[in-house]
Amino acid sequence: MTLRITNVLTRKKEEFKPIHEGKVNMYVCGPTVYDWSHIGHAKTYVAFDVVVRYLRYVGYDVLYVQNITDVGHLVGDAEEGEDKIQKKARTDSVTPMQIVETYTKGYFDNMDALGIIRPDISPRASGHIPEQIEMIEELIKSEHAYVSNGSVYFDVTSDPNYGQLSGRKLEEQEEGTRFEVHGDKQHPADFALWKKADPEHLLKWNSPWSLGFPGWHIECSAMANKYLGANFDIHGGGRDNIFPHNECEIAQSECANGEAFANYWMLTGSLTLEGVKMSKSLGNTLTVNEALYERNWKPEALRMFILASHYGSPVDFSEEAIEASTKGWQRMASAVNLVRTQLSQAPKGEASAKVTGLITQTIADFEEKMNDDFNSPSAIAVLQDFTRAVNTMLNSDEPLSAGSLTAIEQTYQKLGADVLGIIPQGVGGSDSGVDKMDGVMQLIIELRAMARANKDWTAADKIRDGLKELEIALEDRSDGTVWKNQ
RNA sequence: GGCGACGUCGCCAAGUGGUAAGGCAAGGCUCUGCAAAAGCUUCAUCACCGGUUCGAAUCCGGUCGUCGCCUCCA
């Protein structure tokens, strides 16, 4: 069973063959930290989180690099316009580096909250100015770039492969109405490697050409090269950056390094909000903070929603869709909760053949789906089927042995928690203070059981209703009462 | 105008040649002090038209529609 990946570079689904046996070097374009992360970021980074988790699950040693863009880039590619970070700094009456610091922290906090495992290296663009300058010098020396008025531009006509990723041919682009030759450029499609700074520009560095700042694309080329080498396995990012950013990255890297850049390109589909892509100008952004702390959607449910579509497909975010995902997630999470609760009083014994068989089949199906270009929607469907079977056994008359319950719990842990990150730890469906909380709950459940034994329904219902207001649900089963966070 | 995706049940969404996964919603049933949860069960021929094929949601051509990118954006 081999892993297959849809390679945007070749437009084909290909068998994945790493450059070095057992090792995967991977780069994913990170965020520009000038504002709060929104759920579009969440979609992309949850998707790649699962890619990395699965690669590790099947045994690869993954080195995952994701940049932080903290160098001001112009709002437009043209000469005019203000850099986004500087603009935000001005609006908020703080310095650019404060903006960068605030939103870098915010980004990591948000991604942590979503259960995303941090990249192994999160290089900052501002910390790699020398590397970028070095690469630009190499491009000038090899005549792929030219200096013009203190700025440096990449000469797209010097790269016959320019357009290989996005499928945009230079000749066709020239006919486009929105393409104009600009100021210092020799060709309209040439892009900046280094820009000379205006006097009022705050984020600027010394270079051989001017006091200025690097172009938008060069940081990824320079940092990927530094940490992963010229040629590496996987490059990921959002589909919306395929042109010009990714295209330019390839051009710069391959011309500077003299060898192929990334072997596999994986691009995620964009997330839209009520059918429209989120953008500041339309005011239809939904931040991760709002989703998590104002709407109170569970991180696992958000991940479930994101993973319910294939990573390469666009996704439309709606209230209805997230509610549906949450319900679906709850059924699975409740089953895990019940398994963990029953584990404490389960009869001793090995896992039954029925359970072992079910688990073997589930794991095989799950891996088959994930091996097919990380098909998380189908993998989730496998877990849903597993959950139905588990619930049936949990509700049957013969209690499951400790061995069976442990095996089931471990399966959820391996597939649902380790790979997909949608199964919470501990009893009760919460991650923190679970032991003490469970002790308290057991006591309350016991007291209520006494009330029920006396047919004191008033007391029993008061306990249940009161807990419900605290968002704790009690479920009376024939074999006892189970609690869980809602 | 160019480049690229896509159009599958009320909603979300898998499926890329062999006769339609899964989730949500809805109806029926079981269990139950009540409730909740869970289980069982019912529910689509794949935008439209034409073609290739023994056979197509899946391939080809056309039509209509939606979205992304071509200026910063995951």
Image (cartoon, coloured by chain):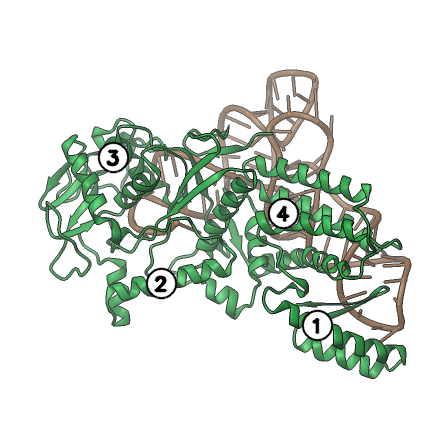
Chain colours: A green, B brown
Q: Give the residue type at disc 1.
A: Gly
Q: Is residue A87 left or right of residue A40?
A: left
Q: Give the residue type at disc 4.
A: Lys
Q: Earlier in the sequence, mark 1 or mark 4?
A: 4
Quadrant containing the C terminus of chain A in the rendered view? bottom right
- Residue A286 shows in this picture: no
Q: Give the residue type at disc 3.
A: Glu
Q: Earlier in the sequence, mark 3 or mark 1?
A: 3
The residue that mark 2 highlights is A103
User: Disc number at residue A414?
Assistant: 4
Element under label 3?
helix
Mark 4 falls within which chain? A
**Whether labels 3 and 1 share one chain:** yes
Q: Is residue A50 above or below residue A114?
A: above
Mark 1 falls within which chain? A
Tell me how far mark 3 sits from mark 2, CA to CA: 38 Å
Q: Earlier in the sequence, mark 3 or mark 2?
A: 2
The residue that mark 1 highlights is A439
Q: Is residue A32 left or right of residue A77?
A: right
The residue that mark 3 highlights is A174
- What is the crowding at mark 1: few (fewer than 14 residues within 10 Å), some, or many (at least 20)? few
**Whether labels 4 and 3 share one chain:** yes
**Whether labels 2 and 4 share one chain:** yes
Q: Give the residue type at disc 2.
A: Tyr
Tell me how far mark 1 sits from mark 2, CA to CA: 39 Å
**Whether labels 1 and 2 share one chain:** yes
State the residue at coordinates (70%, 52%): A409
> What is the x, y in percent for residue A348?
82, 53
Q: Earlier in the sequence, mark 2 or mark 4?
A: 2
Judging depth in this view, the residue of A452 and A200 nearest the camera is A452
